[in-house]
Image: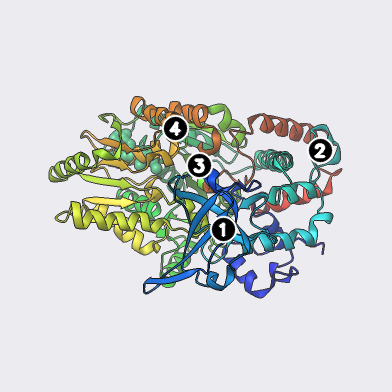
């Protein structure tokens, strides 16, 4: 089977049932399937003896089941299966929740491999919900095992088996998108080997080779694609915007813009009065006031008789932009509207009609702005907020809604400038390097959980003074194994309501709530109908509630510094003293040093650099899944050297063969990756 665009359900051994589950993950084609790369790996090559298990560490043991498993019902919906397993060094008590089929699946006298976190103590060793399989038929242990990003309904095993089937169908005939001489020159393995070993590594070296090759490939294609986009963009010509009297806009603002904001506005306006479409990145630390730069540009565009669109990564943010900007701009004659995934079908229809008729000047929203059938009458400017959450494709898809509209990308991710230039090779960069006046630095402290009573007392005092509070909990780290980050948040909120703040207004919000529910909770918080908001990192990006004065982060060690910086940026937006309290019981010295950095500086760029230095680049951009446009394997921090190599290779290839005539497989892949982007430029 050669066609990578074949639907997964036609892959031998996948079938209807699994295909349905896979589609939930966004895996539709054979290519999607084999490109669903592991998030991480667990080395389960080694099996230990029971006596060598160390409580707290994850390991595998091969042990004989000593007696019939015992099932007991704790309550409705909760059954425990207990089994005792032994080897020549000791005994292991194993408990399973709700896996009663194991009662017959585990036979006394047979040896099984149990793989999980050892608990208990050195005298009584236990495991809860380990992976278990017969010693003679090992699939999930005995080797380096891929751990895939998941959502509910698809298990690791189902995914691994489906991918195995997918690879069997095509791994030997995958077209190599890297030209042979480039592959050899950079000592990269072949594509089939890479796909095989990124999923099912023969060993650590094979995994390294595979990763290196795939990362190089991504960076290489990315570099070529961006360069060609830029070249085409520069070839495009647009009708220059006329200068516009900006005074009415500035006078309508409740404050004066900072020098840095004004500079960014001027740079953008200058771009738009030129003959080339603007393509600018506006980078500014959290709270630096990027929204107003976007608003100024939108005003300028609308006064030139064109439409503007602002795309935000979340419902919450989109709504907030709308609620902040519409009252400011409407009186100036800018007709604003909001469109998100949560809008009703009727709202969407009305908006679409008004948009096409030119009755909306400034449309704000989420991905809904780029749905296929939405038509703009005369789109002149596209602003994307928090760019790192969107792919190049999405950005370009929105730009494709107009005839070479100007684009402005706003990002708070403080990427060192050089890196930004490489990554956003097709963008010009403006930096807002100044905060609005009157901001007091957020007082940051770092404590362990024994401080909880004192912290609660402190929160109560501030709430009584009229302030509001955020409490952030990490997502449960095992979420990819079917755990659930809702629990952490909802349970904690419940506990606070019952035991700590029964008289205060405590609400919670997390990413798995319906957009409407989320919006409602956020709106209530913004309207000060809530005192304390317990949340996951859904509030990490951009949310603006100036009255919030405290950010408490539980299990702070789970977050990257840049992410903590983003979270901290949610407070300190008003004129009163604000606080950020990081709580962690982690004793690791490195971790503690890392968190201490937060108490010493509030400079986002310095923090990003520290993050890179101390922790390595894995978390540099916050959570991996928001990663960089189109990059699934490459890690810009780790792979900086590789990035340079790939860039150089791309430049060299384009200079000797600008149309990629010598390497059709490469050209085809780039065309696919940049399909939406190219549409806009053709
Ligand atoms: P960013 O998106 O860069 O993180 P925002 O645009 O959300 O920041 O602005 C943060 C807060 O600062 C908002 O409440 C905004 O109204 C306010 N603000 C923006 N510019 C100024 C300014 N020049 N002077 C005072 N306050 C400002
Ligand atoms: Mg913002």
The Cα atoms of the two marked residues, 1 and 4, are separated by 55 Å
Question: In the rendered image, which residue does mark 4 sit on?
Answer: 264
Q: Earlier in the sequence, mark 4 or mark 3?
A: 4
Q: Which corner quadrant of the image does residue 428 belong to?
A: top right
Q: Are marks 3 and 1 in contact (CB under 8 Å)?
A: no
Q: Is residue 172 visible?
A: yes
Instruction: Decide: few, some or many residues near mark 2? Use Cα within 10 Å; few <14, some 14-19, many ≥20.
Output: some
Q: Nearer the viewer, mark 1 or mark 2?
A: 1
Instruction: Decide: few, some or many residues near mark 4? Use Cα within 10 Å; few <14, some 14-19, many ≥20.
Output: many
Give the numbered dot on residue 416: none
Question: In the rendered image, which residue does mark 2 sit on?
Answer: 183
500 and 424: which is toward the camera: 500
423 and 54: which is toward the camera: 54
Question: In the rendered image, which residue does mark 1 sit on?
Answer: 131
Q: Which corner quadrant of the image does residue 162 belong to?
A: bottom right
Q: Nearer the viewer, mark 1 or mark 4?
A: 1
Question: In the rendered image, which residue does mark 3 sit on?
Answer: 409
Q: Earlier in the sequence, mark 4 or mark 2?
A: 2
The Cα atoms of the two marked residues, 3 and 1, are separated by 45 Å
Image coords of residue 572 (percent x, y): 28, 36
Instruction: Decide: few, some or many residues near mark 3? Use Cα within 10 Å; few <14, some 14-19, many ≥20.
Output: many
């Amino acid at each position: 089977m050669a066609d990578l665009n074949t639907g997964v359900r036609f892959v031998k051994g996948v079938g209807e049932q699994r295909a349905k589950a896979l589609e939930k993950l966004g895996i539709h084609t054979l290519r999607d399937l084999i490109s669903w790369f592991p998030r991480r790996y667990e080395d389960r090559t080694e099996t230990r003896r029971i006596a060598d298990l160390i409580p707290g560490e994850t390991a595998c043991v091969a042990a004989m089941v000593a007696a019939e498993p015992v099932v007991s019902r704790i309550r409705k919906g909760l059954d425990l299966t207990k089994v005792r397993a032994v080897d020549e060094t000791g005994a292991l008590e194993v408990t399973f929740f709700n896996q009663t089929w194991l009662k017959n699946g585990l036979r006394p006298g047979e040896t099984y491999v149990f793989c999980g976190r050892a608990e208990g103590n050195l005298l009584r060793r236990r495991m809860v919900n380990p992976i278990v399989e017969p010693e003679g038929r090992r699939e999930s242990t005995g080797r380096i095992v891929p751990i895939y990003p998941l959502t509910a309904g698809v298990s690791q095993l189902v995914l691994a088996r489906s991918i195995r089937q997918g690879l069997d169908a095509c791994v030997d005939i995958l077209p190599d998108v890297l030209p042979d001489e480039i592959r050899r020159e950079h000592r990269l393995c072949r594509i089939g080997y890479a796909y095989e070993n990124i999923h099912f590594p023969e060993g650590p070296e094979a995994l390294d080779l595979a990763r290196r090759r795939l990362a190089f490939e991504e960076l290489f294609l990315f570099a070529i694609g961006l360069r060609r986009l830029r070249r085409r963009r520069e070839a495009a010509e647009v009708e220059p915007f006329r200068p516009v009297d900006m005074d009415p806009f500035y006078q309508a603002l409740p404050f004066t813009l900072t020098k840095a904001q004004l500079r960014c506005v001027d740079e953008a306006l200058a771009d738009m009065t030129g003959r080339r479409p603007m393509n600018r990145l506006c980078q500014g630390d959290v709270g630096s006031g990027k929204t107003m730069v976007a608003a100024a540009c939108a005003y300028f565009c609308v006064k030139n008789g064109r439409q503007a669109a602002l795309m935000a990564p979340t419902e919450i943010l989109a709504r907030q932009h709308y609620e902040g900007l519409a009252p400011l701009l409407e009186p100036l004659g800018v007709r604003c509207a909001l469109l998100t995934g949560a809008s009703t079908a009727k709202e969407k229809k009305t908006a679409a009609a008004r948009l096409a008729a030119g009755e909306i000047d400034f449309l704000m929203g989420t991905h809904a702005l780029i749905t296929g059938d939405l038509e703009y009458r005369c789109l002149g400017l596209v602003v994307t907020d928090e760019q790192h959450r969107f792919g190049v494709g999405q950005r370009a898809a929105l730009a494709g809604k107009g005839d070479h509209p100007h684009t402005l990308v706003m990002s708070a991710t403080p990427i060192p400038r050089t890196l930004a230039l490489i990554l956003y090779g097709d963008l010009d960069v403006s930096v807002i390097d100044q905060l609005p006046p009157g901001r007091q630095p957020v007082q940051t402290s770092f404590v362990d959980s024994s401080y909880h009573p004192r912290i609660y007392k402190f929160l109560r005092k501030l709430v009584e003074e009229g302030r509001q509070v955020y409490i952030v909990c990490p997502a449960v780290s095992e979420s990819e194994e079917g755990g659930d980050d809702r629990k952490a948040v909802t349970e904690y909120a419940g506990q606070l309501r019952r035991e700590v703040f029964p008289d205060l207004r405590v609400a919670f919000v997390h990413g798995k709530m319906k957009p409407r529910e989320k919006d409602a909770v956020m709106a209530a918080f913004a309207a000060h109908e809530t005192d304390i908001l317990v949340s996951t990192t859904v509030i990490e990006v951009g949310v603006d509630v100036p009255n919030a004065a405290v950010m408490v982060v539980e299990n702070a060690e789970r977050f990257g510094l840049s992410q903590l910086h983003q979270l901290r940026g949610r407070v300190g937006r008003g004129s009163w003293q604000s606080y950020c309290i990081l709580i962690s019981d982690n004793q690791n010295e490195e971790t503690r040093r890392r968190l201490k950095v937060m108490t010493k500086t509030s400079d986002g760029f310095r923090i990003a650099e520290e993050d890179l230095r101390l922790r390595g680049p894995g978390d540099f951009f916050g959570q991996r899944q928001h990663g960089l446009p189109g990059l699934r394997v490459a890690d810009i921090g780790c792979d900086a050297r590789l990035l340079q190599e790939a860039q150089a290779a791309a430049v060299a290839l384009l200079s000797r063969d600008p149309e990629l005539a010598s390497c059709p497989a490469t050209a085809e892949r780039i065309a696919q990756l940049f399909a939406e982007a190219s549409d806009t430029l053709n």
